Amino acid sequence: MKKSYKDLSYKELVAERDKLRKELVDLRMQKVLGHLDNPLLLRTKRRDIARLNTRIHAVDIGIAEAK
């Protein structure tokens, strides 16, 4: 399920990206240890981070506005 990040402020976008990055690191560690229940979570976290990075970059260059 895709999340919409259009209604977040710039600081909230960056905070959400940092939170997702930490979760991705935790999932990678679980994968290495062999205790990952749902391997598709890695892909969804990476894609959510990419969506956030795109939104943050759009705000940085002035294409989009953060609320």
Image: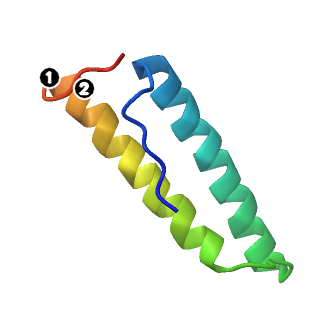
Residue 38: x and y in percent read 73, 78
Q: Is residue 51 left or right of residue 27?
A: left
Q: Hey, what amino acid is under mark 1? A: Gly
SS for callout 1: loop
How would you rate the neighbour count of disc 1 (Cα within 10 Å): few for under 14, some for 14-19, many for 20 or more? few
Question: Which amino acid, by three-letter code, is at mark 2?
Answer: Val
Residue drawn at x 21%, y 33% is 58
Where 35 falls versus 64 (above or below)?
A: below
Residue in the foreground of this view, choosing between 26 and 12: 12
**Residue 6 picture location, percent across and down:** 36, 33
Quick one: quadrant of the C terminus? top left
Q: Which mark is residue 59?
A: 2
Secondary structure of the residue carrying numbered label 2:
helix
Which quadrant of the structure image shows residue 7?
A: top left
Q: x, y percentage for residue 60?
A: 23, 24
Residue closest to the far bottom: 34
* Residue 15 relative to residue 54: left or right: right
- Which residue has dot 1 on it? 62
**Along the line of sight, the residue nearer the viewer: 66 or 17:** 66
- Residue 21 is situated, as x and y percent measured from the top left of the image, at 59, 48
Q: Looking at the picture, does residue 3 appear above or below residue 65?
A: below
Q: Which residue shows up at 60% across the image and 47% down it?
A: 20
Query: What's the distance in space between the residues labelled 2 and 1, CA to CA?
Result: 5 Å
